[in-house]
Amino acid sequence: MKFKKALITGITGQDGSYLAEFLLKKKYIVHGIKRKSSSFNTSRIDHIYENKTYNNKFFLHYGDLLDSNSLTNLISKIQPDEIYNFAAQSHVGVSFQLPNYTSQVNSIGALNLLHAIYDCGLAKKTKFYQASTSELYGEIQETKQSEKTKFYPKSPYATSKLFAYWISKNYRESYEMFASNGILFNHESPRRGETFVTRKITLGLSKIVYGLEKCLYLGNLYSLRDWGHARDYVEMCWKVLQYKKPDDFVIATEKQYSVKFFVEQCFKYLDIKIKWQGKGLKEYAKIVHFDIKKYPLLKKNMKIVKISKNYFRPNEVNNLIGNANKAKRLLKWKPKINIHQLIKEMMDTDLELTRKSNLK
Ligand code: NAP
Ligand code: F7E
């Protein structure tokens, strides 16, 4: 039996790790590109590498989206059936400080990959998935954003992803390449990077509960996001490449919540009652009720969440909510995990992680 071969860029990231697990369960041979790093960067995939079931099925290679030679060499050697381009400088806030680097990796990096496929003579064989994003909608032009909504990127990150979106379409139309865009709305998990807001909240509150930190500092509490679960969404990325033709799909839960709501739900899950006071940069949440036996290190009236101007962006995307009708209809997909299940999984994992690291 011939197994399909997939190549994943960004395999050490949140989505790359979940997609690798998903494809291995589907009997794919999975190759991943990891960057050279001065410290270990494979914690999200070590468990796969160490799993004997996946001996000779899971391979890691050094490479970089900015090193086109490494991409051409790998693609020519592996001859993958599917490539998932997840590699990116993916932090919107950071992209304002690293606009040039972000554009190189996210825009030229995607082009490097597409052209490597073309140069290797694989334009008609290798399917290409581009990790596009709801950030393309930025200053929204329609209340629920679909594949037809006009883009209005508001950050170097979003603008760099706009190039990647269009260059993928260009290669589709110019060379009949199977190149598709998944326009994914925010998706989170216990493997989410620690500087993205949901993980910052679940990890930050866990550290406070265990006495390792005193306060959680956040930026804009009022931005609205459509948050799904990464494990759920990578299945969708795969489905996008199994569709009969290359196309672009919005993936979203179609439900919207504020950052403040996410914070409140985490406290609710912990069974700690808080009260918000103040406005603007002076807004804060203080503890009004909790069980001292369960949380001996907390104190009543302790200011547990404060606002810091450091976490505001020069230009904010305030309001995102997707319309995933096309994906539901054509790919027979719907999200399985709701925000409360997501919060439970993230809080439980971070509490356990903090408890263990506290014992060391
Ligand atoms: P992530 O956790 O930040 O992972 C990014 C990955 O890209 C990491 O493996 C990183 O390697 C790698 N990378 C960065 N620069 C690279 C380079 N120059 N060459 C090769 N690899 C490089 O991101 P994610 O949340 O999994 O998201 C996956 C993709 O989907 C990204 O393209 C992101 O922009 C896009 N996206 C994400 C969301 C979301 O809500 N998560 C929504 C829409 C779109 P290191 O581990 O070495 O840093
Ligand atoms: O911010 C606000 C922040 O950094 C969400 C990336 O995966 O999803 C992600 O981009 C919201 C923003 O994600 C803090 O201002 C408040 O309004 O978690 P985030 P993001 O910017 O939506 C899209 C779809 C991607 O494609 C990206 O790759 O939360 N916020 N206080 C904060 N954000 C952060 N990071 N830290 C705070 O303290």
Image: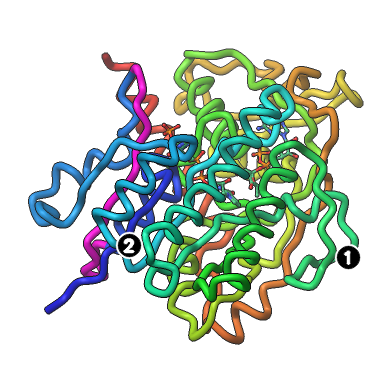
N-terminal label among 2 and 1? 2
Image location (x, y in percent) of residue 197: 63, 35
Q: Is residue 196 left or right of residue 121?
A: right
Query: Residue 275, can we see it?
Result: yes
In the picture, which quadrant includes the N terminus? bottom left
Residue 292 is situated, as x and y percent measured from the top left of the image, at: 51, 23
Q: In the structure shown, which secondary structural element does the residue marked by tag 1 occupy?
A: loop
- Secondary element under disc 2, as helix, strand or loop, is helix
Q: Amino acid at mark 1?
A: Glu
Instruction: Report the front residue among 178 and 133.
Output: 178
Question: How far from the left and from the top, in percent, is residue 44?
Answer: 33, 39
Q: Residue at x 38, y 65 (%)?
A: 121
In the displayed structure, would residue 46 be above or below residue 341? above
The residue singled out by tag 2 in the image is 22
Q: CA distance from mark 2 to mark 1?
A: 34 Å
**Ligand 2 contact, mark 1 (Cβ < 8 Å):** no
The answer to if 25 sits in the magenta stretch is: yes
Residue bounds of the magenta highlight: 24-38
- Label 1: which residue? 142
